[in-house]
Image: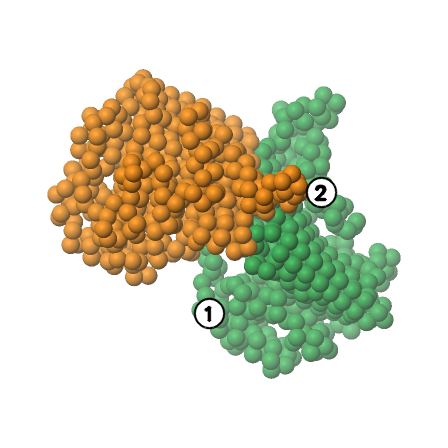
């Protein structure tokens, strides 16, 4: 085993690849949270009165609430006064960047380093990107090309200015500001994020992507994404995230709202790789996210795919409200936790329309001293005749100090529903390992192979370029956990 | 949340009387339990283990409390706790979760307790049968306490029947503590066959030593509102626990089963099979958690829950959970909720079986899986008949109740 111990040591020392910081002039507002801060954020963004009111209402509601503690994670009491709620790395140019030349070259280097194709020379990659650093969207690519088809893809701040009616109609309609504690906080102080509108009968010609990056110290990131897919349209949306390595915890409380109309389809993929903290559990991002899709139209379709490898604490339940008759929802998830990471993640499928179908495939992998939980709800409403759900939650344990948990809830109020749930928890099969060893494959490689095979069902659902990244992430997160 | 008050007042008024009719071992923990109850009150639906049952509403009506002494017919193995052949101090109120409000209330109000004791290496040949008859001329609350002690190498089958002899509102709280010492074998049946006016809150706590096998079968045939909680602690290696549940609900009945199996040591096996048939406006709930502690390697655990919703207004809540801190384990759970197979119904109707009959056949077959788990042949046959009668609606009163005949 000495050989594998050596390997463990090597990997244990392997650093989080994206843990660098960028030295860029950033305008950060004073720490602390109060009504003036909310007003200041709104003022900095030049927002209309209704949005300020929206923020203030959310803030006042938030004050009346307490931080939830039901999740299977050890979330400390967060000091909301100890962080800053707005950090703008583009503040150098007052008007915000008009073209790439105006963007701080340090900023460009950051995104280059992260492998995000911001420059037009990377046009061949065929993905439109909205890059968000701290509280501000740095650059959105391919805007013009998309607008030819009537597709709106821009930062949410820009959308508030350019398309106020659309934003006003949909913002907060899927995740109301009073939905939960973190949703209220986000609604009060959200800074930037992406806005997507796909007009009727349009197939978005390229993958849309947002890249989130936390850079500044002692700031929280509160982005807000709103996707509206009109009748008969299709869009595939990707989201990626990283943060620098810091000893203190950083807060990320986002909201994603998706509206899907008749016969439309949205595919939302996430590769979440926030800084997970070091091997002793110091630092890391608290990822407390509310994501929800509203399948308003008949035969609408929404698919969530997530690969969760980062964050010290993950608290995330991408959900679907199947309102339209014949709507379909899918949730595919791979959550990997290592060292001291804790993840409580899953989905909610709320069946309201007739003949709705949902599928949940969740794969949890826990290693080190981590805790990995699946928490999901399948609710079949009184009028949801013919609802169909299939859930499968598998957990894999690597190491004797980690935990894997499953908390599924099923509330069935209609007798024509067919609901199936199955879950298993086990460690890697010794026979499979032995089989690989026999054929000259080392234990580490064999574990990699088996885990990749185990997660394949989910990874296959990711768009090509993400699938490659996800696979790499998976092996980085897990290598060395078996020895 | 005011239901607690009447029980607090009741205790203040009746504590002396209860104590005078009880014994030292029960009185020793009474005041402390009452304090716990006074502080916690009834759990709201926000308490995870009580999310499907409105405890407050169930305890809200004004019930008279029954303080009639427990009469035990002279028989081997069954004793009134006051005549216990052993010192029960190490057992009484030792594994019951004293923080649970129902357990606390029961401990405060119960004046008598039943002891089933099987001595070392003794094997009870015939089943030990306990019949509980609920009798009363007004709405009555019963606080039943049962202690089962199985010494090393003891073996027994225990059948506990619940009947209601009078058409009255009855509220029963029950706390049962079961201690199985090394190599003990217990086959326990709890059969509820009361009336739609009865509410039952039962907390069962099981402790298992080494090499034990315990089977707990909870069968709800006819009831009003039932809440069964079962906590199992596997504390010795190579032990087995099997929890089977059969729940049949119709009209506006409510059946809530909540289980927790704690694997505290390696090499234990647990199995759970709970099946529900929910008709009319009935509500069924099942929440089962398998908890595997860090050192409990080589645990094998299987949890199955299958439910049939037979009417548009039936509701089913299910929550099969795994909480695992050991890596070398095999744990699985499965849960299904669905409708009757239309193809099977059609097949039978084609062959001249009327629809109602075909449905009953299917429901029977569905429940058959649980009944098949019963080891004793005569008992199994009895249950086949009872379950079928229940589905035909012929089980409106407890049919083998000697009081009514």
Query: Is B290 positioned to the left or the right of A201 in the image?
Result: left
Crowding at dot 1, Cα within 10 Å, few <14 / some 14-19 / many 20+, comes out as few
Disc 2 marks which residue?
A457
Residue at 87% x, 57% y is: A124
Give the mark nearest the N terminus, 2 or 1: 1
Quadrant in which the N terminus of chain B is drawn = bottom left
Crowding at dot 2, Cα within 10 Å, few <14 / some 14-19 / many 20+, comes out as some
Residue at 68% x, 70% y is: A156
Query: Is A473 positioned to the left or the right of B68 in the image?
Result: right
| Place of residue A122 in the rendered image (x, y in percent of width and height, measured from the top left) | 84, 58
- For the residues beneath circles 2 and 1, the answer to whether they share a chain is yes
Residue at 46% x, 49% y is: B250
Instruction: Give residue B331's quadrant in the image.
Output: top right
CA separation in Å, label 2 and label 1: 42 Å
Task: Give SS at disc 1.
Answer: helix
**A204 over B327 or under it: above or below:** below
The chain drawn in orange is B
Q: Nearer the viewer, residue A272 or B330?
A: B330
Asked if residue A197 can be seen in this view, the reply is yes
The nearer-to-camera label among 2 and 1 is: 2
| Place of residue A176 in the rendered image (x, y in percent of width and height, measured from the top left) | 57, 68
Asked if residue A311 can be seen in this view, the reply is no
Task: Give SS at disc 2.
Answer: helix
- Please identify the residue farthest to the top as the structure is shown: B121
Disc 1 marks which residue?
A63
The chain drawn in green is A
Q: Nearer the viewer, residue A220 or B99?
A: B99
**A479 over A268 or under it: above or below:** above
Q: Nearer the viewer, residue A174 or B266?
A: A174
The chain ID associated with circle 1 is A
Query: Is A93 positioned to the left or the right of A173 in the image?
Result: right
């Amino acid at each position: 085993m000495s050989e594998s111990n050596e390997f463990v040591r090597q990997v244990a020392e392997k650093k989080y690849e994206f843990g660098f910081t960028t030295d860029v002039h950033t305008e950060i507002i004073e720490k602390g949270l109060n009504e003036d801060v909310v007003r200041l954020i709104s003022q900095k963004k030049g927002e209309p009165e209704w949005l300020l009111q929206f923020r203030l209402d959310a803030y006042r509601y938030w004050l009346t609430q307490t931080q939830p503690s039901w999740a299977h994670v050890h979330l400390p009491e967060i000091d909301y006064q100890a962080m800053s709620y707005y950090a703008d790395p583009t503040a150098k140019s007052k008007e915000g960047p008009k073209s790439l030349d105006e963007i701080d070259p340090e900023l460009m280097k950051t995104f280059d380093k992260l492998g995000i194709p911001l420059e037009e020379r990377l046009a061949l990659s065929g993905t439109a990107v909205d890059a968000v650093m701290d509280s501000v969207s740095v650059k959105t690519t391919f805007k013009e090309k998309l607008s030819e088809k009537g597709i709106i893809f821009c930062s949410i701040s820009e959308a508030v200015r350019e398309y106020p009616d659309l934003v006003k109609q949909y913002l907060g309609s899927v995740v109301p500001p009073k939905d939960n504690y973190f949703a209220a906080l986000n609604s009060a102080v959200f800074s930037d994020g992406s806005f997507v509108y796909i007009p009727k009968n349009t197939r978005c010609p390229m993958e849309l992507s947002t890249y989130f990056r936390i850079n500044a110290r002692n700031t929280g990131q509160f982005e807000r994404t709103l996707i509206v897919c009109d009748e008969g349209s299709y869009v595939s949306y990707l989201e990626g995230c990283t943060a620098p390595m810091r000893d203190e915890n950083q807060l990320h409380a986002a909201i994603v709202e998706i509206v899907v109309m008749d016969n439309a389809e949205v595919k939302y993929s996430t590769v979440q790789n926030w800084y997970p903290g070091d091997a002793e559990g110091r630092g890391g991002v608290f990822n407390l996210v509310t994501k929800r899709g509203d399948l308003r139209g008949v035969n609408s379709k929404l698919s969530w795919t997530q690969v969760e490898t980062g964050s010290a604490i993950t608290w995330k339940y991408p959900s679907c409200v199947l309102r339209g008759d014949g709507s379909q929802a899918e949730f595919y998830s791979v959550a990997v936790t290592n060292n001291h990471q804790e993840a409580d993640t899953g989905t909610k499928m709320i069946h309201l329309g007739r003949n709705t179908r949902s599928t949940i495939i969740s794969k949890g992998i826990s290693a080190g001293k981590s805790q990995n939980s699946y928490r999901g709800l399948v609710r079949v409403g009184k009028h949801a005749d013919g609802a169909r759900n299939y859930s499968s939650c598998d957990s894999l344990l690597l190491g004797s100090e980690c935990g894997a948990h499953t908390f599924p809830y099923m509330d069935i109020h209609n007798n024509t529903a067919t609901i199936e749930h199955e879950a298993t928890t086990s460690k890697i099969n010794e026979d499979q390992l032995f089989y690989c060893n026999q054929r000259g494959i080392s234990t580490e490689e064999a574990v990699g192979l088996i885990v990749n095979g185990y997660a394949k069902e989910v990874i296959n659902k990711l768009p090509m370029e993400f699938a490659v990244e996800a696979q790499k992430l998976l092996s980085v997160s897990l290598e060395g956990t078996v020895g | 949340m005011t239901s607690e008050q009447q029980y607090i007042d009741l205790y203040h008024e009746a504590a002396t009387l209860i104590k005078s009719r009880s014994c030292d071992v029960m009185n020793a923990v009474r005041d402390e339990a009452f304090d716990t109850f006074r502080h916690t009150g009834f759990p709201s639906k926000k308490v995870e283990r009580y999310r499907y049952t409105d405890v407050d509403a169930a305890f809200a009506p004004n019930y008279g409390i029954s303080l009639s002494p427990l009469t035990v017919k002279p028989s081997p193995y069954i004793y009134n706790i006051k005549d216990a052949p052993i010192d029960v101090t190490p057992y009484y109120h030792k594994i019951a979760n004293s923080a649970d409000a129902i357990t606390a209330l029961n401990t405060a109000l119960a004046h008598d307790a039943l002891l089933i004791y099987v001595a070392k290496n003794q094997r009870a040949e015939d089943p030990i049968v306990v019949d509980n008859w609920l009798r009363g001329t007004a709405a009555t609350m019963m606080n039943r306490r049962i202690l089962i002690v199985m010494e090393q190498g003891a073996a027994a089958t225990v059948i506990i029947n619940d009947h209601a002899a009078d058409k009255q509102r009855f509220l029963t709280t029950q706390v049962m503590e079961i201690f199985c010492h090394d190599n003990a074998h217990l086959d326990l049946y709890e059969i509820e066959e009361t009336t739609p006016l009865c509410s039952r809150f039962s907390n069962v706590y099981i402790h298992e030593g080494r090499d034990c096998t315990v089977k707990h079968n909870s069968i709800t045939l006819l009831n009003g509102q039932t809440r069964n909680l079962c906590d199992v602690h596997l504390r010795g290696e190579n032990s087995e626990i099997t929890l089977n549940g059969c729940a049949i609900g119709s009209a506006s009945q409510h059946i809530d089963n909540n289980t927790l199996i704690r694997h505290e040591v390696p090499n234990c096996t647990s199995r759970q099979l709970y099946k529900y048939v929910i008709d009319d406006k009935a509500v069924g709930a099942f929440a089962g958690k398998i908890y595997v502690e860090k050192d409990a390697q080589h645990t094998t655990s299987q949890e199955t829950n299958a439910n049939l919703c037979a009417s548009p207004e039936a509701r089913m809540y299910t929550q099969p959970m795994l909480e695992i801190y050991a890596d070398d384990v095999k744990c699985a759970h499965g849960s299904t909720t669905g409708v009757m197979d239309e193809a099977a119904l059609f097949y039978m109707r084609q062959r001249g079986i009327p629809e109602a009959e075909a449905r009953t056949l299917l429901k029977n077959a569905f429940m058959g899986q649980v009944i098949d788990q019963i080891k004793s042949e005569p008992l199994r046959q009895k249950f086949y008949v009872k379950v079928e009668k229940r589905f035909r609606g012929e089980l409106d009163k407890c049919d083998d109740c000697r009081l009514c005949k």
